[in-house]
Image (cartoon, rainbow, N blue to C red):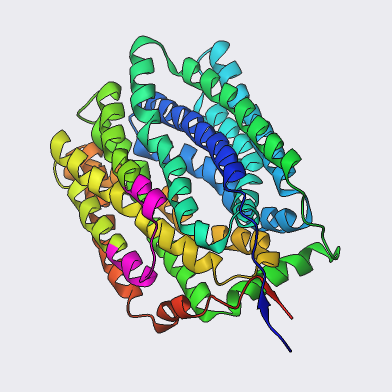
Amino acid sequence: MNMTIARKKSDFGKFLLLWSGELISSIGGGLTSFGLGVYIFQRTGSASATTLVTLLGFLPTLLLSVPAGVLADRFDRRLLMMIGDGLSALGIVYILICMLTGEARLWQICLGVFISSVFSSLLEPSYRATITDLLTKEEYSKANGLVSLAGSSRYLFSPVIAGFLLSVSNVKLLLIIDICTFVLTVISAAVVRNSIRSKPVATKEPFFISMKEGWKALTSRKGILLLVLVSSVITMFMGMFQTLAGPCILSFCDEKTLGIAETVCASGMLVSGLLLGILGIKKHYVAVLAVALSLAGVFMAGFGLIENIYTICISGFMFFAMLPFANNCLDYLARTNIPDEVQGRAWGLIGFLSQMGYVVAYGVSGVAADTIGKVTGLGVGRGSGAVILFAGACLAVSGIGILLIRSIRELENNQEVLRGVKT
């Protein structure tokens, strides 16, 4: 039996077009996230209310990621992206209408972000699997750097833009801009869809059988499953930081300063994202992952240490600079150890399992910050800082622990025969 490797044609230009649409969408989503966070915190003074909105906006994406992954392997992935992006605007429109007719209540904002999240859940597995459709294995690392950059734009560009716009207008303007970005995103996905042919589905197996095949793709490699479970623990600590950074800074600064500080911090992702987009990572993915996560934990702890905007900006910058390295390695190790034909459903399961930590973080971090602030008498700002410091220390320890798991280390040595092989 002769084995030959089939070379896959690169469509990097089409990837860039699709990536541009997601970059714009991410910026628009960041404007809404920033604006609603400030809006809620200024009216309630509670970190719990802020994290509640974050949780309800995240939960549908998590719960629906697995069926969305199955759909990505059964139907046109670009069409699913268009549907998900386009209809997710409905939730934002609802919140805007509530604000135009009077002050939006907390439950109305929660309902709006929940609706938006339900439809946007279709996007991620299809987007991830489409990257595999468009690119060659050699281009994955550079593409991952650009994807990380697009994801970081909601933290890099959105806060400073939103902070400036809030100083001259109000949150309704941010929602309108976000709604407009959905149109551009849908157009970019439509152009890519018309220029490439969707892969035909060989069989129409039952829905739950498809989910089972995705699960089999993960459990067939112990290292992949452990890597995903470790990622869940890591996202729990990172979720605590992401939800409490705003209340931590807003407790002693205004929203304009918050926007500038968040942009300065997130510019760390810009620097490392651009570096990875140009150079990529060639080897030692597990070691780079462990070091990046450990350093991210150290800098996260520094962020919550004291109420000093300069210390916060420096620590935040270094924290965000570590994330693209970690995301790049996690993405590469998973992508190169999963066969192409189950990528969609596998990414759905990976998204579900790895992001379970966010549910815990969003559920407890706000309550913990409010409780610590009340018990100590230092206020919600210092309560948030204490939770962030604790989460950073735990993240640093978790990063080091990855090096001790042999099956994860072995993932680097078992990639070459998993895709593009013909008999």
Residue ID at (32%, 35%): 246
Dominant SS in magenta: helix
Q: Quadrant of the C terminus?
A: bottom right
Q: In which quarter of the image is the N terminus?
A: bottom right
- Give the answer, above or below, for where 148 lies relative to 377: below
Q: In this view, does 339 lie to the left or right of 295?
A: right
Residue 261 is situated, as x and y percent measured from the top left of the image, at 25, 32
Return the residue found at the far bottom: 1
Residue ID at (48%, 28%): 32
Foreground of the two, 369 or 196: 196
Q: Is residue 370 magenta?
A: no
Q: In this view, does 415 lie to the left or right of 123?
A: left
Foreground of the two, 220 or 271: 271
Residue 224 is situated, as x and y percent measured from the top left of the image, at 51, 73
Q: Can residue 304 be seen in this view?
A: no
Residue 76 is situated, as x and y percent measured from the top left of the image, at 76, 48
Q: Report the magenta residues as a range.
A: 272-291
Q: Does the magenta stretch include residue 289?
A: yes
Q: How many dots with numbers?
A: 0
Q: Can residue 310 be seen in this view?
A: yes
Residue 254 image-quadrant placement:
top left
Q: Is residue 369 left or right of residue 348?
A: left
Residue 230 is situated, as x and y percent measured from the top left of the image, at 42, 68
Foreground of the two, 345 or 251: 345
Residue ID at (42%, 58%): 328
Residue ID at (42%, 14%): 170
